[in-house]
Amino acid sequence: NHSACTLAYWHQPTYSAANGISEEGITAQAFWQLLYEYRADLVLNGHDHLYARYRPLDPSGNYDPRHGIREFIVGTGGETLDTVVTTTVTSGTGETNMEDPSGNSNFNASNIEAATGDYWGVMKLTLNQNGYAWDFESAMELPGATAAGTYSDKGVGTCHGSVDRW
């Protein structure tokens, strides 16, 4: 791939806004490593029934504004919505932190830039030659939601550019 802007997608997220990393999510760390090495820009996941946008991260889950990959989770259709977990997560004896495979107990609080588990909705994502734009818009509020009204998250980002691998 010699594209200036690259997106990859799969079902279960590498980093979970609902604190629910599965085996697929843990295995996806290998994908993240390769995507990072080849300068991918975005990862799009579902599985968590919520909307979340992470800041650009390296394969270890560290903020990397220069080379990091931004993860979007858009699982906001057809199911009961999940709660976004931004509180400190602790693990019991013999358990691992399910929020982040590296074990950071405050991972989501540190790395989620925008999120909601109160609205079903859709996201328009546009890749162009040098960047990308996103526009998440709520479609319907969850009955009994703590938030009222609508939810929107819009923005733009710059891509890393193509990699000469030949």
Image (spheres, rainbow, N blue to C red):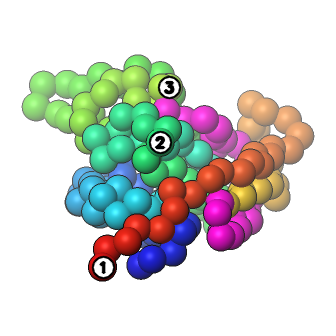
SS state under label 3: helix
Q: Which residue is mark 2?
A: 66
Q: Which residue is mark 1?
A: 166
Rendered residue at 77%/49% (across/down):
154
Cα distance, mark 2 to mark 1? 23 Å
Rendered residue at 41%/78% (across/down):
1
Main SS, magenta region, reads strand
Q: Three-letter amino acid code at disc 3?
A: Ala
Expressed as whole percent of the image width and height from the top left, the position of residue 65 reads 49, 38
Q: Which residue is mark 3?
A: 109
Q: Earlier in the sequence, mark 3 or mark 2?
A: 2
Count of marks placed on residues: 3
Q: Is residue 69 above or below residue 92?
A: below
Residue count near mark 2 (Cα–Cα under 10 Å), binned few <14, some 14–19, many ≥20? few
Q: Earlier in the sequence, mark 1 or mark 3?
A: 3
Q: Does the segment drawn in magenta span residue 62?
A: no
SS state under label 1: loop
Range covered by the magenta-colored residues: 111-131
Q: Does the segment drawn in magenta span residue 130?
A: yes
Q: Three-letter amino acid code at disc 1?
A: Trp
Q: Three-letter amino acid code at disc 2?
A: Arg
